[in-house]
């Protein structure tokens, strides 16, 4: 691999296509034409939603693609010029996809956080044009002498470039002399035309004509946690809660919840998401299972924020003090866990905002304030904020609240229902906060239509919930995962939560324990960020009748779980989740989004995909390939043939290679066609590491 003057250790990028940095002089087109001499179009990365920057995370391998062509049959080249946030310049040669659509592509791992600038440059590839013509004509005995002289003149031009290494110029001078030698025959001339070393010289330092320089573009690279993470969600009030003799419950606190942190860390989760930790309203408080009947001691929904005890900048008194929260954050950080805090911009009827700023809400003709609805669900305990009545006042207050929690050590916010708030508001808030602290991450809980979901991601949200929980069949998952990796990857980063307090799909309700294993494995391997809501490892699968929610939903009551006992009895999915997170950390290919490739099986329930990372793009300098084969039917035993395009990881079709099942430790010799049997009741998934090719 050719590098710039910076060492491989210090440069802010990794690439297999790097060239020595050289300045180029653009061809000047006539002012009365929009078309450039060697046109450049459809550059990527790009965002289709408004004037937003595409984005990546530090260490992400980003495909750079563009359309370019020229008239006739002369060859062209395309290169990418990159400028890191610190000003490092690098040059990368694109390869033709040879797909009939004139698309060109290269991949670069962007390591430095901040705004990168890039542009595409196209040019007439004078050596490539001669090489193609000479290989045909000399072999056919047509214009052979002319082809030899044209090649010799190209080599003369190259030798005149003082930036070329001396040894390279000597080789080219000798080749030029050989082409002009009176006794040179066609075979000797063809050997020079087909010399791979000479072709390599011109690949690294092409002879250019008609150079066309594209527009300057940008891509925002955010910190790694913006794109990579294993999330775990729990309610602090349930961790350490206990029943009293009178039948009421004493809430868990931040201090008791701290005792759960080692188990979360041992499972390998690196982000802990907390539902709202603020005081909960008493007016219209919800009882168990979202009923309007409450009993003394019912805690209410944490999303019904605010009471006489305070609002969004206050800790619920049952959980402890603000100092206790800061201590909880510090303890989590010491265990390798970041705290993600819920940001829910809504209010209980007795939130201080309601009395101080009634204009922030919607008043109905009868004088009452409108409560939240998501038909058929009704949330009488929550007032939505109306962002149109006093937008400046609301902006100032939300900015104050977010800054307050950042000051307490929070750098990640999971945003509740962002699609019910104006897009402009989020664009402003995220831009304002990240300008002050680029490490802050916002996750959009945008269970909504594709257009608002994608526009929120474009406007700044670093991560997004997706439709993953409702994509369960092989066909659904193939389409869904491929779109995440290749259609929306420049701006939408998925976080594949397997369940939430509000989402217990029929697949989990009726799929048994196999369904829980299948969904966790797909989420953990198909995307670099995924999440699990507490109770998943205990196979909690009983729904409230007629709903997708858990019965006795933790949103409205305390939960008592025997975590340690379940593990001791062998009745917990925690060991499997631990193994999944170990696999994710050991395999850099699984910490990428855009490298997913769909493969094939003869069975309509066997999903096959792979993730590959080239050695030149990998942090440890070694290639990494993981193949995932899943039985998506949790009720069956399936046996079928699996068909792989092994060229994705550099193995010729038909060649054998060794694989190791990272879950069971089994090893097999595979090729591009393989028999598999997956029993949903014992082991419904293979997670295979490609060990080596023979």
Image: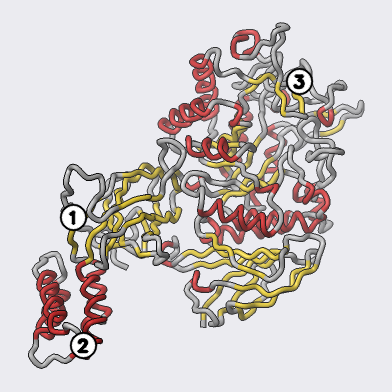
The image position of residue 224, as x and y in percent, is 48, 48
The answer to whether residue 87 shows anywhere in this view is yes
Closer to us: mark 1 or mark 2? 2
Residue in the picture at 67% in, 53% down: 267
Which callout, 3 or 2, points at the residue further toward the start of the chain? 2
List the residue tagged with mark 1.
24
Nearest-to-viewer mark from 3 and 1: 1
Q: Give the x, y percent position of residue 116.
A: 34, 45
Distance between the alpha carbons at the discs numbered 3 and 2: 87 Å
Mark on residue 141? 2
Q: Is residue 105 visible?
A: no
User: What residue do we see at 76% from left, 32% from top?
Assistant: 555
- Helix, strand or loop at disc 3? loop
Q: Which disc is residue 88 wearing?
A: none
Question: Foreground: 249 or 397?
Answer: 397
Give the vertical position of 540 relative to 614 (above or below): above
The tag earlier along the polypeptide, 1 or 2, is 1
Task: Give the side of residue 12 with respect to residue 568, left or right.
Answer: left
Quarter where residue 107 is shown: bottom left
Residue 380: image tag: 3
Element assignment for label 1: loop
In the structure shown, which secondary structural element does the residue marked by tag 2 occupy? loop
């Amino acid at each position: 691999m050719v590098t710039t003057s910076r060492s491989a250790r210090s440069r802010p990028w990794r690439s297999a296509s790097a060239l020595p940095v050289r300045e180029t002089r653009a061809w000047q087109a006539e002012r009365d034409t929009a078309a450039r001499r060697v046109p450049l179009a459809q550059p990527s990365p790009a965002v289709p939603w408004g004037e937003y920057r595409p984005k990546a995370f530090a260490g992400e391998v980003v495909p750079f693609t563009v359309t370019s062509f020229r008239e006739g049959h002369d060859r062209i080249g395309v290169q990418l010029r990159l400028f890191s946030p610190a000003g490092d310049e690098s040059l990368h040669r694109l390869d033709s996809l040879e797909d009939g659509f004139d698309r060109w592509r290269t991949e670069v791992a962007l390591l430095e956080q901040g705004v990168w600038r890039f542009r595409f440059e196209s040019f007439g590839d004078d050596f490539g044009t001669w090489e193609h013509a000479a290989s045909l004509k000399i072999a056919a005995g047509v214009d052979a002498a002319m082809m030899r002289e044209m090649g010799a003149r190209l080599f003369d031009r190259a030798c005149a470039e003082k930036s070329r290494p001396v040894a390279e110029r000597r080789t080219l001078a000798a080749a030029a002399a050989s082409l002009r030698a009176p006794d040179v025959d066609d075979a000797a001339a063809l050997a020079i035309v087909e010399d791979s070393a000479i072709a390599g010289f011109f690949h690294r330092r092409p002879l250019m004509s008609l150079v066309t320089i594209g527009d300057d573009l940008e891509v925002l690279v955010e910190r790694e946690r913006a794109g990579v993470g294993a999330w775990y969600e729990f309610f602090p009030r349930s961790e350490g809660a206990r029943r009293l003799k009178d039948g009421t419950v004493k809430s868990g606190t931040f201090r008791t919840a701290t005792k759960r942190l080692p188990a979360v860390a041992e499972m390998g989760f690196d982000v802990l998401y907390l539902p709202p930790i603020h005081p909960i309203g008493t007016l219209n408080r919800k009882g168990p299972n979202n009923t309007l009947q409450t009993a003394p001691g019912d805690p209410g929904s944490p999303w019904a924020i605010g009471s006489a005890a305070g609002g969004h900048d206050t800790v619920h008194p049952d959980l402890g003090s603000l100092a206790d929260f800061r201590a909880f954050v510090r303890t989590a950080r010491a265990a390798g866990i970041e705290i993600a805090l819920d940001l829910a911009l809504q209010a209980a009827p007795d939130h201080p905002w309601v009395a101080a700023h009634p204009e922030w809400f919607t008043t109905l003709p009868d004088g009452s304030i409108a409560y939240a609805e998501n038909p058929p669900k009704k949330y009488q305990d929550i007032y939505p904020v109306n962002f149109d009545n006093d937008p400046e006042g609301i902006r100032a207050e939300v900015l104050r609240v977010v800054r307050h929690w950042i000051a307490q050590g929070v750098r990640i916010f999971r945003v509740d229902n962002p699609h019910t708030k104006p897009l402009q508001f989020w664009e402003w808030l995220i831009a304002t906060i990240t300008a002050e602290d680029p490490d802050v991450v916002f996750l959009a809980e945008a269970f909504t239509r594709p257009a608002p979901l994608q526009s929120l991601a474009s406007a700044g949200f670093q991560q997004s919930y997706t439709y993953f929980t409702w994509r369960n069949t092989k066909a659904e998952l193939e389409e869904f995962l491929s779109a995440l990796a290749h259609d929306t990857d420049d701006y939408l980063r998925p976080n594949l939560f397997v369940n939430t307090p509000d989402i217990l799909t029929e697949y989990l309700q009726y799929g048994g324990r196999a369904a829980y294993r299948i969904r966790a494995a797909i989420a953990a391997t198909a995307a670099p960020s995924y999440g699990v809501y507490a109770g998943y490892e205990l196979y909690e699968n009983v729904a409230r009748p007629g709903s997708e929610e858990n019965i006795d939903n933790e949103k409205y009551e305390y939960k008592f779980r025997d975590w340690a006992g379940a593990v001791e009895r062998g009745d917990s999915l925690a060991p499997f989740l631990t193994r999944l997170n170990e696999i994710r950390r050991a395999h850099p290919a699984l910490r990428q989004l855009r490298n997913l490739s769909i493969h094939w099986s003869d069975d309509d329930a066997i999903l096959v995909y792979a993730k590959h990372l080239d050695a030149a793009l990998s942090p440890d300098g070694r290639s990494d390939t993981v193949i995932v084969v899943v039985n998506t039917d949790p009720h069956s035993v399936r046996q079928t043939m699996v068909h792989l395009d092994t060229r994705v990881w550099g193995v010729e079709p038909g060649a054998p290679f060794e694989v190791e099942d990272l879950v069971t430790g089994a090893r097999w010799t595979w090729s591009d066609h393989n028999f598999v049997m997956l029993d949903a009741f014992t082991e419904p998934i293979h997670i295979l590491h490609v060990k080596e090719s023979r």
